[in-house]
Image (cartoon, helix red, strand yellow):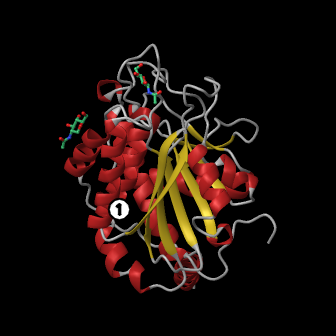
Amino acid sequence: MLAWIVTGVCLFYLLVNFLLLHWAGVKPLARFINDENHLNATLARLLKPRWPGSLGHSQVRDFLLQELLDLGFHTDRDEFVDGVAFTNVMGTINPEAPNFLLLCCHYDTVNLTDVEGYLGATDGAVSCAILLNMAKTLGPYLREELRKRLDIGLALVFFDGHEPMPTDRKDSSALRGSKRFVRMETLPLESIELAIALNFIGAPAQAYMSHYDNTYMLHNRLAEIELDLRGSRQLAPCHLLFQKLKDHDTDLPDDHYPFLDEGVPVIHLAPYRYPQVWHTAADNAAHLHWPTVLNMNSIIRQFVHEYLENHDDDTTYRLDS
Ligand SMILES: *[C@@H]1O[C@H](CO)[C@@H](O)[C@H](O)[C@H]1NC(C)=O
Ligand SMILES: *[C@@H]1O[C@H](CO)[C@@H](O)[C@H](O)[C@H]1NC(C)=O
């Protein structure tokens, strides 16, 4: 009698477990192979002074466009003049899609009077390298699987004109590129389901919190992905980057602001304070905390893949819907 009850309870437990996993759509994480050589080589190509008007600036712009093209992306460049020439660079998979997951960062550096050759390693370069490395390591998936989809596309946007020019106020970001992108609707704003802006990644002891309530669940998903990757030994030894915490009253000004103003759901993938090296000569490769860079790279790649895979017609994070 007892044996029957135990067996019954066990079977019931297994059934509930199976159904819960099934309903919740919990699948084991897909595995991707790191390409650290590509990440390093990409970062090396970006780490040069690249203020608008400089040689480094046009070299980096051309490099971004060429990389995106080589990785099978449709590319767009949007040039505009405001004293000097600025160029936003965009790469898309499924450029005609009705919905987009958009990831962005800025590629220009500030032309500081007191720091010659400011490299902005955490200030743009690492974020750009992470996006290109994601495009590289997810390449087969993007070209073979995502291309067949009609419901969603991926957009990687590299903004210019983020930093103030000598004629601007020194203490604030100019955000020329992102403001222009939103104003011109380089991608129709209605089609942008989620915009993720990356910045200031790669200093030691960083913590990442949620900044906006409507994307808090997605932020938590990033935190869970970090734990899952760590559990399956796919991360470098490092403190946890993502905290399941709401920091909804403060945020560093960045390229997500213009999107936010237009009601596009955003995640600001940035720490809660500026790196100590920010706008100093020390914002270079030698001062990067490499485990942070590697882990952020793995977490974002996993998140993007999962987001695209799980997307369906009901997906929305807009407050007005
Ligand atoms: C990439 O660069 C980091 C930091 O400079 C270094 O620690 C790491 O060994 C490099 N990895 C490879 C594969 O070259
Ligand atoms: C950037 O700084 C350099 C050196 O201080 C200066 O020669 C150059 O004119 C500046 N460029 C711009 C676009 O302001």
**Mark 1 residue CB less than 8 A from any atom of ligand 1:** no
- Residue displayed at 31% across by 33% down: 48
**Residue 126 location in percent, x, y?**
38, 41
Count of numbered badges drawn on the protein: 1
Above or below residue 131? Residue 276 is: above
Above or below residue 28? Residue 234 is: above
The residue most toward the right is 320
Task: Report the image quarter containing ligand 1.
Answer: top left
**Residue 147 location in percent, x, y?**
40, 81
**Residue 128 location in percent, x, y?**
40, 47
Q: Quadrant of the N terminus?
A: bottom right
User: Could you say which quadrant of the image residue 295 lies in?
Assistant: top left
Residue tagged 1: 135
**Residue 96 location in percent, x, y?**
52, 80
Instruction: Decide which of 59, 26 is in the foreground and name it.
Output: 59
Query: Is residue 188 visible in this depiction of the protein?
Result: yes
Instruction: Decide which of 19, 185 is in the foreground and name it.
Output: 185
Q: Quadrant of the C terminus?
A: bottom right
User: Could you say which quadrant of the image residue 22 lies in?
Assistant: bottom right
Above or below residue 243? Residue 317 is: below
- Residue displayed at 46% across by 73% down: 27
- Residue displayed at 47% across by 39% down: 240
294 lies left or right of 175? left
